[in-house]
Image (tube, helix red, strand yellow):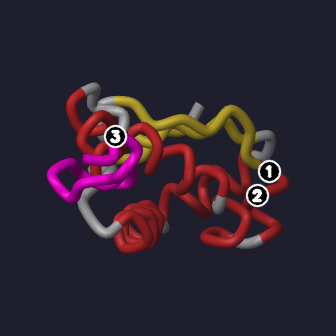
Amino acid sequence: MDENKRTSNGTSLGDAITQIMKAYRLDGKLKEIEILSKWDELMGRAVSLRTKNIRIQNKILYLELDSSVMRDELLNGKSIIIQRINKEAGFEMIRDVWFG
C-alpha cells in the first residue's frame, strides 16, 4: 500500500479549525472582531467618527463618545444598535449598550 495515499477517515481542515475554535471558545471572539470591524457599515459614518474604544464584554457593548449630542441620540436608539448588531452576528451577541 502506498504510504503517501490519503484516506477519507479524517476530518477536513475547515472542520478541524471550527472544532478547535469552539473548544477554546474563540468562535464568539472572532465574530465580535468581525462585527466591530463593520461598525462604520452598521452604524454609518457620522456615528463611527464620534465613537471611540468600542468593545464587547459579557454581552454588553461599551462605547466611548466624543459628543454629548451623539450620546443622547444613541441612548434613544439603543434598541436599534442592539438589533443591528445581533442581526449581523446571527445570534444574540449583545443585550445592552453602555456609553462612556
* Among the two numbered marks 1 and 3 on one chain, the one whose residue lies closer to the N terminus: 3
Of badges 2 and 3, nearer the viewer stands 3
**Element on which disc 3 rests:** loop
Quadrant of image for the C terminus = top right
Question: What's the residue at 31%, 55% (across, down)?
Answer: 12
Q: CA distance from mark 2 to mark 1?
A: 5 Å
Residue 56: image x %, image y %? 45, 37
Q: Which mark is residue 61?
A: none
* Mark 3: few/some/many CA within 10 Å (<14, 14-19, 20+): few
Which labelled disc corresponds to residue 3? 3
Q: On residue 50, which mark appears?
A: 1
Above or below residue 54? Residue 96 is below
Q: Is residue 28 visible?
A: no
Task: Report the amino acid beneath label 3.
Answer: Glu
Question: Badge 1 local density, few (<14 within 10 Å), some, or many (20+)?
Answer: some
> Dot 1 lies on which element?
helix
Give the residue type that dot 2 points to. Ser
Residue located beneath label 2 in the image: 48
Instruction: Write the residue at 39% across / 30% down.
Output: 57
Q: Residues within 10 Å of mark 2 (few under 14, many from 20)?
A: some
Span colored in magenta: 1-14
Tell whether 33 sits left or right of 32. Answer: right
Spot occupied by residue 90 in the image (x, y as percentages of width and height): 31, 69
- Image-based side of 21 in relation to 63, left or right: left
Decide which of 80, 24 is in the foreground and name it: 24
Tag in front: 2 or 1: 2
Is residue 9 within the magenta segment?
A: yes
Q: Residue furthest top?
A: 24
Cβ atoms under marks 2 and 1 closer than 8 Å? yes
Residue 54 can be seen, yes or no: yes
Residue 68 at x, y = what percent?
72, 46
Question: Is the magenta region chiefly helix, strand or loop?
Answer: loop
